[in-house]
Image (spheres, rainbow, N blue to C red):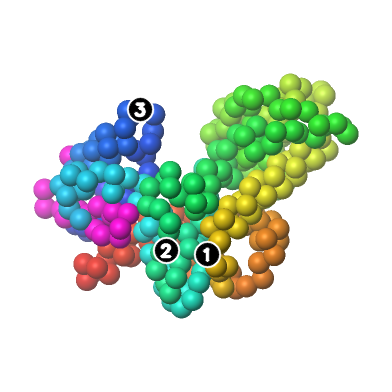
């Protein structure tokens, strides 16, 4: 990756991989990642690690306080997003494939109630659901099927990517097989995956069945995000929202539920859709460049 990047000698690092179950502790994960980064760096490069208090520090400093470096990506994004709402209360909402971040901003600065993921989940600032990887059975405890409601098979048969493929809100990607069954990310294959939630196959589950189930799952996910939004905004409702990620369709449903009618700033418009999808990386690069005067 470093070899294919534009010519430069400065690297800024944040991470979210330290919670992978190949590591016994977060500290072990942080150290593994940072030591890997250090090994990969050419000797004449400079590197800095973003911490959850907003500081950029050398790798050696981050190794000594690994929990401050763990999952600091959300803070970098919020610190960058604050420039678009420099006054008053706002909220940064980032909806990705796996999680949703809801980060209060006050006068352009992040105002979280906690800095690690556990505290943020307790406060509604981190919702572990996303528009691609989340299992549908974790979103719905009953799935509609031909006038009845069936408890779903609690198995990784279908994900929210399948829901939004069926609804036409995520584009088909025939070459992508990062799905529950390893088959393509197409509407037809998504329909077959949804069928398995009621232990059916495509002979017992048609396109109408798929659409009814998908709409129920999409609405249920929006209700969950709406609940987190209300909790994150308990100290005061936001006057504006800054949005990143690639789940605008989920945010639209959510804001309709909570009745928000204020201004919405889309990073996809201010930057471009590709940068919005990787907004944390872009935010960190901008912050590091500004602080280092580059």
Q: Residue at x 38, y 36 (%)?
A: 19
Residue farthest along the right direction in this orientation: 147
Contact between marks 2 and 1 (CB within 8 A): the answer is yes
Q: Nearer the viewer, residue 118 or 92?
A: 118
Q: Earlier in the sequence, mark 2 or mark 1?
A: 2
Q: Earlier in the sequence, mark 1 or mark 3?
A: 3
In terms of secondary structure, where does tag 3 sit?
A: loop
The residue to which callout 3 is attached is 22
Within the magenta stretch, is there residue 55? yes
In the picture, measured across the screen, residue 206 lies left or right of residue 187, that is right
Query: How far, Cα to Cα, is label 1 from label 3?
Result: 37 Å
Image depth: mark 2 or mark 1 in front: 1
Q: Tell me the magenta residue range.
A: 39-56
The residue to which callout 2 is attached is 111
Where residue 284 appears, x then y in whole percent? 34, 59
Packing grade of label 2 (10 A; few <14, some 14-19, many >=20) is: some
One can see residue 56 in this view: yes
Contact between marks 1 and 3 (CB within 8 A): the answer is no
* Residue 254, above or below 25: below
Query: How far, Cα to Cα, is label 2 from label 3?
Result: 32 Å
In terms of secondary structure, where does tag 2 sit?
A: loop
The residue to which callout 1 is attached is 235
Quadrant housing residue 34 = top left
Q: Residue at x 62, y 52 (%)?
A: 227
């Amino acid at each position: 990756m470093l070899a294919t990047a534009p010519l430069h000698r400065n690297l800024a690092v944040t991470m979210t991989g330290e919670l992978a179950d190949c590591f016994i502790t977060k500290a072990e994960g942080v150290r593994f990642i940072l030591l890997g980064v250090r090994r990969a760096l050419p000797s004449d490069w400079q590197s800095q690690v973003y911490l959850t208090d907003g500081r950029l520090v050398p790798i050696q400093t981050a190794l000594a306080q690994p929990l401050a470096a763990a999952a600091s990506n959300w803070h970098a994004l919020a610190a960058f997003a604050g420039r678009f709402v420099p006054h008053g209360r706002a909220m940064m909402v980032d909806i990705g494939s796996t999680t949703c971040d809801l980060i209060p901003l006050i006068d352009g600065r992040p105002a979280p109630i906690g800095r690690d993921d556990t505290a943020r989940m307790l406060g509604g600032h981190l919702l572990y659901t996303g528009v691609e990887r989340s299992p549908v059975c974790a979103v719905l405890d009953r799935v509609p099927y031909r006038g009845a409601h069936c408890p779903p098979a609690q198995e990784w048969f279908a994900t929210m990517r399948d829901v939004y493929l069926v609804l036409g809100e995520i584009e088909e990607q025939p070459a992508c097989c990062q799905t529950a069954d390893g088959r393509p990310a197409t509407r037809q294959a998504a329909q077959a995956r949804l069928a398995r939630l009621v232990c059916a196959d495509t002979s017992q589950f048609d396109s109408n069945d798929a659409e009814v189930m998908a709409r129920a799952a999409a609405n249920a996910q929006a209700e969950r995000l709406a609940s987190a939004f209300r909790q994150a905004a308990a100290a005061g409702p936001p006057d504006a929202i800054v949005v990143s990620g690639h789940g605008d369709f989920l945010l639209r449903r959510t804001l309709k539920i909570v009745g928000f009618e204020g201004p919405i700033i889309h990073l996809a418009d201010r930057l471009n859709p590709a940068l919005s999808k990787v907004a944390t990386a872009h935010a960190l690069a901008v912050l590091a460049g500004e602080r280092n005067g580059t």
